[in-house]
Image (cartoon, rainbow, N blue to C red):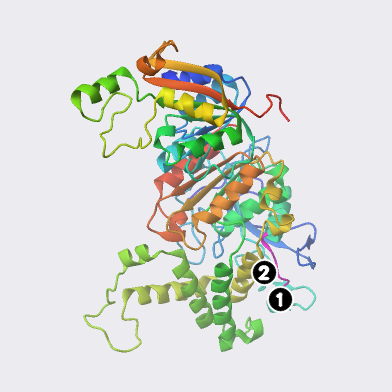
Amino acid sequence: MLTTPSSLDQRFGLSRRVVLPEPLRLDGGALLAPVEIAYETYGTLAADGGNAVLVCHALTGDQHLASAHPRTGKPGWWQRMVGPGKPIDTDRFFVICTNVLGSCMGSTGPASVDPSTGRPYAMAFPVITIRDMVRAQALLLDHLGVARLAAVVGGSMGGMQALSWAATFPERVEKCVVIASTARHSAQNIAFHEVGRQAVMADPNWRGGDYYDSEPPAAGLAVARMAAHITYLSEAGLTEKFGRRLQARAQKSFGFDADFQVESYLRHQGLAFTDRFDANSYLYITRALDYFDLAEEHGGLLANAFRGTATRFCLVSFDTDWLYPTAESRSIVHALMAAGAPASFVELSSPFGHDAFLLDSPELDRVIHGFLSAGR
Amino acid sequence: MSLRPDLAIIAAHLPAGARALDIGCGDGELMAALRDERGADVRGLELDPGNVAAAVGRGLSVIQGDADTDLAGYPDQSFDYAILSQTLQTARAPDRVLDELLRIGRFAFVSFPNFAHWRVRLSLLWGGRMPVTRLLPERWYDTPNIHHLTIDDFRAHLAERGVIVEGAWFLSGDKQTGSAAANFLAEHAIFLLRREQRSLDRG
């Protein structure tokens, strides 16, 4: 657990929220207001404001980057990466993590009250994009007095935000770290998300999204999470962890109980997720990911997204990640080379698939620490 | 800082402020020297992830990749200098790698161990065994050096391809040696090349 900065400034610290001073114009055309963003900060903002690092969370992550999660009590999702003396060193950097727009941990999303009706938005919430999330973060940075980021860092969906930051506000980003991510969602990625969304929508409790006064569609959301969770792992990792071992029994039951450990594990993951996540937020955020195509936003050529940039990039992929495989990172690297941008890239070896970036990886620590520490 | 002798020669002859790509950059030793001592804008390509991590840790821009397959992504003439040190003999298609070097860079530095050095010749002539020397330390079955070449082979290849030699340096041990009997006396050669048809002027 990190301590809040000694500063008495109420903008800084854990569990903060702010209503953005202006409405947000969304890629979909809608004007969203009010927009509230929940966030946490760690470390102390330098007098010149030059030491701010924005860390962007993945699909189902949140702003509890390195502090205990209020609902689960578990440590922050990247506690091993962020803190004093850690790769993202809070003795040196002022670290910001926001709950993304559309999510359900305090930022405005489908569960928020629609001021025009006084009821939760539910499916009346406008569809949002990764760039919308980034624009909301930019307004938060204005509020915090951070003109320019020393770095923006993210894995998976966080990596898409980091790329989008570098493409949308190049003058505000000195360094950009993109881990286990992609510049566009592939047909396979969209296909998996569609399975998840259909599972949510097929739950009778979903009721077209209007479930905030009744039972939430937990069964559908749990199935969505189970399917997604498989994509975060690797066959080798699953085999190593579970193999075909049976769960708390000596023999197969010849029924549909969770005979296998892997089934029991997935059911647990699915159920635990429904305790902390809103089903409608899951629909909206997966949609934002599906719409993500950075090249399309820049005339169909990814290199155009980075033309003339002075931002330094560092990309990392994992060899067993089949959700956002190394080839996706390589195509970003090629675009960066074509744009003449300073870029580093490394594929690290791990048995843990896409999830590897959240797990213990000394090589990843070394790359991130080295990249962030090095001067221009 | 004491660079490997071939790297020291490259560092000494790279103009200050040049844009350079170091192919097979290892842990970035040469890149760091070029950046710190020559003010070069230098990028690297390296196969080994541990080496890439080490180079990134030095604040260098290094991309993990293979000289045989990953040079195509670099635009034409995107660097003033492309550097290939001690890597040509490990490439699956060294001729194509050389072409890529001269496409990506206006100039190319290439260094390689000379297989016609007298110690190598003697070893094969008298011992009848594949030579294992200081610069070629691996045995025949586990060597990464799959395309051995000599200084004369290289010169002949350059002539066939119409590549111009801007400079050449030869090393015996850690000392420079003359070019007269280099094919016999030099353990190691460093060439500075450019393509014939291209103008020396930028643009």
For the residue pair A87 and B71, the one nearer the viewer reads as B71
Instruction: Identify the residue position indicated by label 2 in the image.
Output: A109
The chain letter for the residue carrying disc 2 is A
For the residue pair A119 and B54, the one nearer the viewer reads as B54
For the residue pair B7 and A329, the one nearer the viewer reads as B7
Residue B173 can be seen, yes or no: no
Residue at point 47%, 26% (across, down): B156
Q: Secondary structure at mark 1?
A: loop
Residue at point 37%, 72% (across, down): A265
Instruction: Indicate whether residue A304 is drawn in magenta.
Output: no
Q: Position of residue A176 (x, y in %)?
A: 60, 45
Q: State the mark number for residue A121.
A: 1
The C terminus of chain A, quarter of image? top right
Q: CA distance from mark 1 to mark 2?
A: 8 Å
**Is B149 on the left or on the right of B96, as rendered?**
left
Q: Position of residue A250 (x, y in %)?
A: 21, 80
Q: Which residues are magenta?
A: A125-130
**Is B15 on the left or on the right of A305, as rendered?**
left
